[in-house]
Image: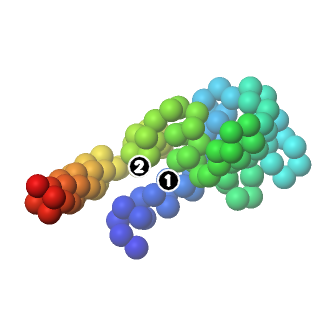
Amino acid sequence: MSQYGELIERIKEISISDYAQSCGYTLVSMGTYFSLKEHDSVRISKRKNMFWRNSNGASGSIIDFVMEFESCSFDEAVEKLAERYGIVVKSLLKYVSCKKTFRTERILKDVSELYF
């Protein structure tokens, strides 16, 4: 697994319920899962560390939770979580971001040469 993949897996181990509580949400225990008092359509599985938001169909890991409730991108969510939990990530994200940008520019150049 790549360094980036390992970083994402490490971040996904962060407990959604702990994170939600630290953000000020009130957890309501409902057997094998939690609900949020402020958003009663949200379910957080204690065992799977996943969330579901029945009102709009959003679901996923801690990263998806942060994207959903803090209205941010994947990279921003990863940075916020890493920063909050002391995981070093900035240089790796910049590298991945630059690599994506370079790849996109190269594809656009190739396409423009084909059609123009």
Which mark is first along the chain, 2 or 1?
1
Quadrant where the C terminus sits is bottom left
> Which one is closest to the eye, mark 1 or mark 2?
1
Extreme residue in the front direction: 116
How far separated are the C-alphas under marks 1 and 2? 8 Å
* Above or below 13: residue 71: above
x 39%, y 45%: residue: 75
Question: 25 or 110, which is in the foreground?
Answer: 110
Q: Residue at x 67, y 34 (%)?
A: 21
Which residue, as the protein is rendered here, is positioned at the far bottom? 1
Q: Regarding mark 2 in the picture, which secondary structure is present there? A: loop
Give coordinates of residue 112: x percent, y percent.
Answer: 14, 56
Whether 39 is drawn above or below 89: the answer is above
Secondary structure at badge 1 equals helix
For the residues bearing labels 1 and 2, Cβ distance under 8 angstroms: yes
**Percent coordinates x, y for residue 108 in the rendering:** 19, 55
Q: Quadrant of residue 18?
A: top right
For the residue carrying disc 1, how many other residues have a C-alpha within 10 Å: few (<14), some (14-19), or many (20+)? many
Q: Which residue is at 50% across, 32% downward?
A: 71
Q: Amino acid at mark 2?
A: Ile
- Left or right for 107, reference 51: left
Q: Residue at x 79, y 32 (%)?
A: 40
Q: Which residue is mark 2?
A: 87
Q: Residues within 10 Å of mark 2 (few under 14, many from 20)?
A: some
The quadrant of the image that shows the N terminus is bottom left
- Please tell me the numbered disc located at residue 83: none
Q: How is the image coloured?
A: rainbow
Residue 91 in sight here: no
Question: Label 1 amino acid?
Answer: Ile
Query: Can you identify the residue that label 1 sits on?
Result: 11
